[in-house]
């Protein structure tokens, strides 16, 4: 896989000597002034370490936010002076690794790459991603269904693509309506939509259809993995924290999630009224007719391609509309 280090210190890659010796991996040093154009030319998923030394928090914060928004970049930090005040915030924003002073001086080992892959719940080996093209046989979808290669830039209006689909909806909506004024109700809706957007757009998710309290997030399928499963598991595990940090309403927040993979013709949000798709019908039925409040569900094809470490979190639930369903274990 490709590993990049963004720094103006030419000898910083000496701390990555194990990667230099590896036959399967490569490392490239990028100066701060040049890294943006270089990374924009990359089409495969890559691991990028940003050296925050010799910069003030405002300056490196801006650069990290830029990296975190790049869909093919797994952003990480080198903090050789232990200057970052709150590394946990970087992880909540989508970061994948942090090398503080002691870890950095110890030297980066190839074993750490495997640990990062386990954390992501997917492989960051560039060879694992399927190029844009027709659908592979194992998924049993029509050949005219196109794999967009995990990139929105490969998605065009009016064509039939294979998407990962995530349904998300706030629970207890009747109670919210009954006990809330219009202004408060609007705040609840806006906060939940912003919460979903923030947690999934960093892995290339895009809100596509939305009603009052929830809707559908699309992810262009990359041909090999489902990174949104890990992100969804985190949302279920961190509901109590999210209720305090993301929702200023003074009451526990509950939501239900469902993940499926299927084909649909793509049209821009707001112009989807004429779309006919069995997959879209199914994911909405799963979320509104089957899902129990406070739970996460995935379909068989998603489960079988999910990282083995995450599979242990799911139990076989049964069948719904002809599809085998798995439910995440309750952790709280």
Image: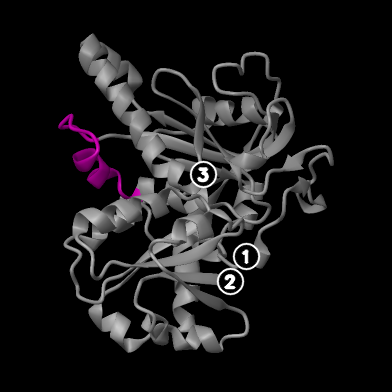
The secondary structure type at the circle numbered 3 is loop
Q: Given contact means CB atoms under 8 Å apart, are the residues at marks 1 and 2 in contact? A: yes
Identify which residue is drawn at 40% across, 36% down.
Answer: 197
Q: Name the residue under label 3.
A: 204
Identify which residue is drawn at 38% across, 50% down.
Answer: 66
Task: Out of 289 and 250, give the one closest to the viewer.
Answer: 250
Of labels 1 and 3, earlier in sequence is: 1
Any magenta on residue 248? yes
Q: Given contact means CB atoms under 8 Å apart, are the residues at marks 3 and 2 in contact? A: no
Q: Is the residue marked by circle 1 packed among few (<14), some (14-19), or many (20+) residues within 10 Å?
A: some
Q: Relative to 36, does residue 15 appear above or below in the rendering?
A: below
Query: What's the magenta region?
Result: 237-252
> In the image, residue 174 lies at what x, y percent?
33, 16
Q: Which numbered circle lies on residue 257?
A: none
Q: Mark 1 points at which residue?
A: 126
Q: Mark 2 points at which residue?
A: 1
> In the image, residue 153 lies at what x, y percent?
62, 41
Q: How far apart are marks 1 and 3 (CA)?
A: 17 Å
Any magenta on residue 228? no
């Amino acid at each position: 896989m490709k590993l990049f280090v963004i720094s103006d210190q030419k000898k910083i890659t000496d701390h990555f000597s194990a990667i230099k010796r590896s036959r399967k991996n490569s490392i490239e040093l990028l100066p701060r002034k040049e890294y943006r154009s270089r990374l924009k030319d990359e089409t495969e998923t890559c691991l990028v370490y940003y050296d925050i030394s010799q910069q003030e928090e405002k300056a490196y914060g801006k650069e990290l936010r830029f990296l975190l928004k790049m869909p093919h970049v797994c952003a990480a930090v080198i903090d050789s002076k232990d200057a970052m005040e709150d590394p946990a915030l970087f992880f909540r924003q989508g970061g994948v690794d942090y090398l503080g002073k002691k870890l950095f001086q110890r030297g980066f080992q190839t074993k750490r790459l495997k640990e990062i892959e386990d954390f992501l719940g997917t492989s960051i080996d560039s060879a694992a991603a399927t190029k844009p093209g027709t659908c592979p046989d194992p998924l049993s979808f029509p050949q005219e269904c196109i794999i967009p290669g995990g990139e929105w830039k490969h998605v065009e209006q009016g064509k039939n693509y294979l998407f990962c689909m995530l349904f998300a909806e706030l629970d207890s909506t009747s109670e919210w309506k009954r006990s809330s004024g219009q202004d408060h109700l609007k705040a609840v809706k806006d906060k939940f939509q912003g919460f979903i957007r923030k947690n999934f757009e960093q892995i290339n998710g895009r809100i596509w259809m939305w009603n009052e309290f929830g809707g559908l997030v699309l992810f262009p399928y990359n041909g090999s993995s489902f990174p949104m499963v890990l992100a969804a598991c985190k949302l279920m595990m961190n509901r109590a924290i999210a209720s305090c940090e993301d929702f200023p309403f003074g009451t526990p927040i509950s939501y239900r999630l469902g993940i499926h993979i299927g084909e649909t013709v793509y049209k821009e949000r707001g112009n989807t009224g004429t779309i006919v798709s069995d997959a879209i019908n199914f994911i909405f039925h799963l979320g509104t007719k089957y899902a129990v409040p406070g739970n996460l569900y995935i379909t068989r094809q998603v489960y079988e391609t999910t990282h083995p470490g995450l599979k242990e979190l799911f139990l076989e639930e049964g069948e719904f509309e002809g599809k085998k369903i798995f439910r995440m274990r309750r952790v709280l």
